[in-house]
Amino acid sequence: MDVLTPSYTSKSFADVTIKTKTTTFQAHKAVLRARSSELTGMLKDNPESIELGNYRDGIVRRFLQFLYTDSVEDLYCQVAIDLYKMADKFKVEFLKKKCRNF
C-alpha cells in the first residue's frame, strides 16, 4: 500500500464518521467518494458524519473494509446477502459481484 493511501484501520486524517445504532467508524471522505457514487452524493454538503442505522455493525465494517481493500473477510451466506443489499444501495458493483459469486 502506498504511504499516502489511507488505511482502513488508520484513523489518521479521518474526516467523517459513519454511525450505526451502536458503533461509530472513522473514514476518509476521499476513499468513500472514489468508491461509491451514492456516498459521493451523501457527502456533497461535506457532513461530518453519515447515519447508517439500518445496517448492522458487522455489515458496515465489512463494507468499509471492502471500500479500502477490495477484499471481504468472514463471508458466509447471511452476511453475503446483507452485504449485497448494502452494495446495491451504495452502487458498489464489484462488491455486489463478489457477494453474488459467493
Image (tube, helix red, strand yellow):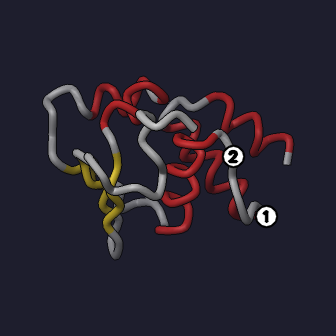
Crowding at dot 2, Cα within 10 Å, few <14 / some 14-19 / many 20+, comes out as few
Residue 33 versus residue 88 in the image, above or below: above
Crowding at dot 1, Cα within 10 Å, few <14 / some 14-19 / many 20+, comes out as few
Q: What residue type is labelled 1?
A: Tyr
Q: In which quarter of the image is residue 94?
A: top right
Left or right of 71 on screen, residue 46: left
The secondary structure type at the circle numbered 1 is: loop
* Residue at the spot of label 1: 76
Q: Position of residue 97 (x, y in %)?
A: 75, 34
Badge nearest the viewer, 2 or 1: 2
Residue at 69% x, 62% y is: 79
Left or right of 41 on screen, residue 6: right
Q: In the depicted view, which residue is nearer to us: 30 or 23?
A: 30
On residue 1, the disc is none
Residue at 33% x, 42% y is: 28
CA gap between label 2 and label 1 equals: 14 Å
Q: In the depicted view, which residue is nearer to us: 16 or 2?
A: 2
The secondary structure type at the circle numbered 2 is: loop
Quadrant showing the N terminus = top right
Q: Where is residue 54 in the image (x, y as percent from the top left)?
A: 40, 60
Residue at 69% x, 46% y is: 71
On residue 71, the disc is 2
Q: Which amino acid does label 2 sit on?
A: Ser
Q: In which quarter of the image is residue 47?
A: top left
Q: Position of residue 92 (x, y in %)?
A: 57, 32
Q: Position of residue 72 (x, y in %)?
A: 69, 52
Of the two numbered discs 2 and 1 on the same chain, state the one appearing first in sequence.
2
Residue at 52% x, 33% y is: 2
Residue 79 versus residue 66 in the image, above or below: below
Q: In the depicted view, which residue is nearer to us: 74 or 38?
A: 74
